[in-house]
Amino acid sequence: MVSSSSRSPFTTQQVQNSAGPIHGFSGPAAGGQRGVDQFRDLAVPLKKSKKGGTRTLCPPPPPDSPPSATTSSAGGGPMLTGSNSGRLRRLSPEEEKDRELVRKALEEYNRTVEVLRRGKPKSKTPNPAGVYKEAVDVLRRKRACVNDEKRLGSVPGVEIGHRFHHWGEMMVVGLHHPYRRGISVMKQDSGISLATSIVATDSKENSVTVERIVYVGEGGMPYGCTDGKLARDQKLDGGNRALENSMKMKQPVRVICKLPSLGSAAGYVYVYYGLYLAVEMNEVTSVHGKVVFQFVMRRISGQPDLPGNRRMQRANN
């Protein structure tokens, strides 16, 4: 349970009733008939099945009422050096402080990883993932993590386009809180759970571009497993339920995408894409013949472009 003192300064009701500009952004949310139509056809069955194929659980909003984008991040707007116009801007003293705190947390995390690695006996089958999680636990005990209170919206000190080499790096800066779970959840005092962030991995069932993402919910398959025999039906609970609630309440969700990278020792990096709104949810049949929940997400307008205007598309096949 997140207390009112540790939660962001906006309640859900205040966010819904706000008629002012988007917190941290100057432009309105992209929408209208064109904005809705380009997502309407994305939720298609990945495989026909005897269970009935695709069933739309939550249809997209009507054309005359596109989702309104709001954030409730404490500490001001996005901590960015760029803008949606492509021009650089000067960071405020508070933003520079937040950025420095994030840098120090990442340095401490990576030093801890190296110390733990040196202390582990050499093995033919090392488990680096265990070291990364242990390093997070060490920093938490030392209270060296930043932004450890869950929040909606942007995270102070983390810029759009920031690259993370380990899952643990996202945890110690407060961008994504659970370890190796695709959806981070924040429980309101009212008892309603909302999604604060998602990690779209390189699964073939996820389709990613900068402006729109088709994200298959969490669960149903052990992390990193590709054996379809271990697949199970996903359940509409936990993170999947929280993401559905965020869609219904039109709350922003941070999106991180796992991308291939030749410059990373692991062969991939996690890149922060910015804030998105879930606009549609469908129950579909996966490539393994199991029920999964497919969320269509749209990037909130007014945010800076990804550095270099990177675009990436993973086609379902």
Image (cartoon, rainbow, N blue to C red):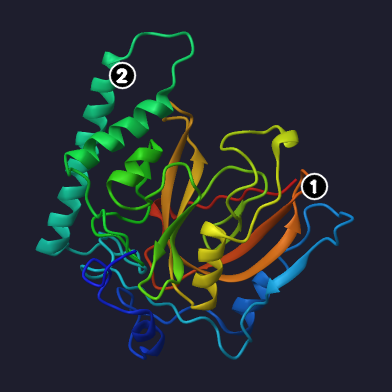
Label 2: how many residues lie within 10 Å, few (<14), some (14-19) or many (20+)?
some
Q: Nearer the viewer, residue 301 or 257?
A: 257
User: Which quadrant: the N terminus?
Assistant: bottom left
Q: For the residue marked with disc 1, what is the amino acid?
A: Gly
**Residue at the spot of label 1:** 289
Q: Farthest residue toward the right?
A: 50
* Residue 12 relative to residue 239: left or right: left
Residue 117: assigned label: 2
Q: Is residue 48 above or below residue 29?
A: above
Rendering coords of residue 248 (x, y %)? 54, 77
**Which residue sits at x=64%, y=67%?**
281
Q: For the residue marked with disc 2, what is the amino acid?
A: Arg
Helix, strand or loop under label 2: helix
**Which residue sits at x=31%, y=19%?**
117
Q: Nearer the viewer, residue 270 or 175?
A: 175
Rendering coords of residue 188 (x, y %)? 38, 70
**Which residue sits at x=32%, y=31%?**
134
* Residue 86 relative to residue 9: left or right: right
Label 1: how many residues lie within 10 Å, few (<14), some (14-19) or many (20+)?
some
**Badge count:** 2
User: Which quadrant: the C terminus?
Assistant: top right
Rendering coords of residue 234 (x, y %)? 66, 53
* Residue 269 relative to residue 101: left or right: right
